[in-house]
Image (spheres, rainbow, N blue to C red):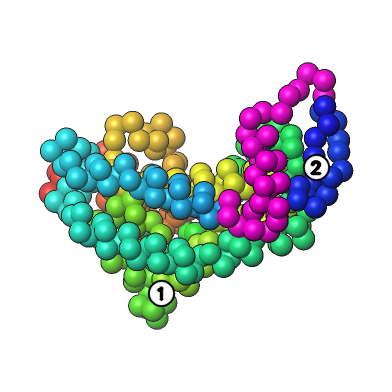
Amino acid sequence: MDYIRGNYSMVAATATLPADRQLYFIEQAWISFYAYMNNDLVATGVLFFLIHEGVYFGRSLPWMILDLLPGIFGRWKIQPLKTPSLKTQMECLKDVLVAHFLVEAIPILAFHPLCQHLGISLDVPFPNWRPMVLQLATFFVFEDAWHFWFHRLLHSSSYLYKKVHKQHHKYAAPFGLTAEYAHPVEVAITGTGTVGAPILWAYFFGNIHMITIITWVVMRLLQAVDSHSGYEFPWSLHHFIPFWAGAEHHDDHHRLFIGNYASSFRWWDYFLGTECKTTVEKRSGVTTKKTL
Ligand SMILES: [Zn+2]
Ligand SMILES: [Zn+2]
């Protein structure tokens, strides 16, 4: 079976699929989308923008609904006395939307030329899941380290804290929408850690596909929104993966303003002694009554 390779709107080179392999629906949709857009730069920009908005707000919505039903879900709220009102959530939503359109649209649209320069693949079929898993795990570890050190810097410098990071700490009891409520400089720093991971991989090792980068961005967005959700469940991921940070870890950071600087994992704060007191107590089995 012949299929289009590479730059769908401009190149019509073909290659052949193995006889036992059909293109999956998502691969056909991928080709159709790029062909329909007829401009790869705009297509990649639009794709990233739609995925970013869709995942960010789509994932924040269930957390908003939970906050509107404290009678049912309040027992899992980490700071139940500080459940945000709908008005507070709407104010945050408006600010985040404005920031997304003004601040983030430009780097999102400039992403495709960089990908082309680094030879990031747009081809179908998509890569095998095994190298994807290795790449995604590497991105998580890299971004977490980046986040830990820059976040720690934003707290250790009173100038940077006041001028940049203070905005993100407006909400001492975070909720999903607050994940990207931050000063543009902070958005640029954290965004560089997220996008920089696959860029560095492409630069040093090559052999990376755009679908892997999209998967990574989706996973990172889900991690960011969930860690700001303000909810801790018995089935939350860190109960099964002890080094996963989760919502409780970051909620303590927002409440106490110091410690727990990493994004996805607990190891940096654990080994460098920057954990919040409450995180250490919880791990030691000291239970604090919910009076927050
Ligand atoms: Zn902070
Ligand atoms: Zn935060």
- 45 lies above or below 8: below
Q: Position of residue 207 (x, y in %)?
A: 77, 45
- 170 lies above or below 46: below
Front-most of residues 41 and 71: 41
Q: Position of residue 210 (x, y in %)?
A: 67, 47
**Callout 1 secondary element:** loop
Instruction: Give the residues drawn in magenta, as a range.
Output: 18-47
In this rendering, does residue 233 appear at all? yes
Q: Position of residue 75 (x, y in %)?
A: 17, 38
Q: CA gap, disc 2 to disc 1?
A: 44 Å
Residue situated furthest bottom in the rendering: 159
**Mark earlier in primary sequence (2, 1):** 2
Which quadrant of the render holds ligand 2? bottom left
Residue at 46%, 65% (x, y): give it.
101
Q: Is residue 24 magenta?
A: yes
In this rendering, does residue 270 appear at all? no
Mark closer to the observer (2, 1): 2
Q: Crowdedness of circle 2 by 10 Å Cα count: few (<14), some, many (20+)?
A: some
Looking at the image, residue 282 sits to the left or right of residue 96; the answer is left
Q: Amino acid at mark 1?
A: Val
- Does the beta carbon at disc 2 come under 8 Å from ligand 2? no
Q: In the rendered structure, find residue 164 and report the number of the disc placed on it.
A: 1
Q: Position of residue 64 (x, y in %)?
A: 27, 47
Quadrant of the image occupied by residue 194:
bottom right
Q: Amino acid at mark 2?
A: Arg
Q: In the rendered structure, find residue 5 and report the number of the disc placed on it.
A: 2
Front-most of residues 177 and 90: 90
Residue at 52%, 49% (x, y): give it.
51
